[in-house]
Image: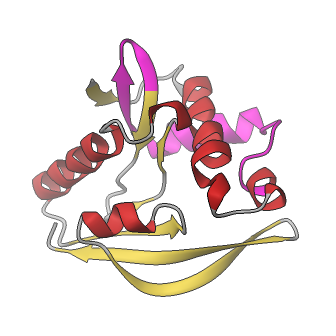
Amino acid sequence: MLVRAFKDGDEPALQAVFYSAVHIIAAKDYSVEQLDAWAPHRPDWEAWTSRMQGLRPLVAEADGRVVGYADLQPNGYIDHFFVSGKYARRGVGRLLMESLHARAAESGLARLFSDVSVTAEPFFERFGFVVVERKDVVIGRVSLPNARMEKLSP
């Protein structure tokens, strides 16, 4: 398994990871309506492509396949952190988180923070993140609970 920089053309594979992470991994914590609002069956490809090109995430590959991705913004914010449902609990998330921590250290960031799903909270906690605020995100007319988590001095 390896982690590499994002490259143009990764967008469809990243969308497949995102969709499977939401609809397979998060399915135990969210309703079908919430999952469909979060990761619709038919994404807006123009918006998705633009978003991924803006985030420039790190990309995890296993056997030549994209199996996860995560970004770290210059202010320490982790906007996207997703692992394919088919590769859950195989070390992909750990490898991505370790890569983000290394990047944060290189950049001298004193704080990492993210808006994390109910499903991802235990994973982030294992890496020293704590909940600082619980909230609901509204997508369309659908409300999804999540938490702002942060870690100081990564």
Q: Residue furthest bottom?
A: 133
Q: Position of residue 12 (x, y in %)?
A: 62, 25
The quarter of the picture where residue 118 lies is bottom right
Q: Position of residue 6 (x, y in %)?
A: 40, 30
In the rendered image of this protein, does residue 74 appear above or below residue 67? below
Q: Position of residue 98 (x, y in %)?
A: 20, 48
Q: Position of residue 153 (x, y in %)?
A: 14, 73
Is 48 inside the magenta-drawn segment? Answer: yes
The C terminus, quarter of image = bottom left
Q: Is residue 53 left or right of residue 149?
A: right
Is 135 inside the magenta-drawn segment? Answer: no
In the rendered image of this protein, does residue 59 appear above or below residue 93? above
Q: Residue furthest top?
A: 64
* Span of residues in magenta: 37-66
Q: Which residue shows up at 36% across the image and 30% down it?
A: 60
Q: Which residue shows up at 64% across the image and 64% down it?
A: 29
The quarter of the picture where residue 76 lies is bottom left
Q: Residue furthest right?
A: 141
Q: Is residue 90 left or right of residue 84?
A: left
The N terminus, quarter of image = top left
Q: Which residue shows up at 49% across the image and 23% down it?
A: 8
Q: Is residue 110 left or right of residue 63?
A: left
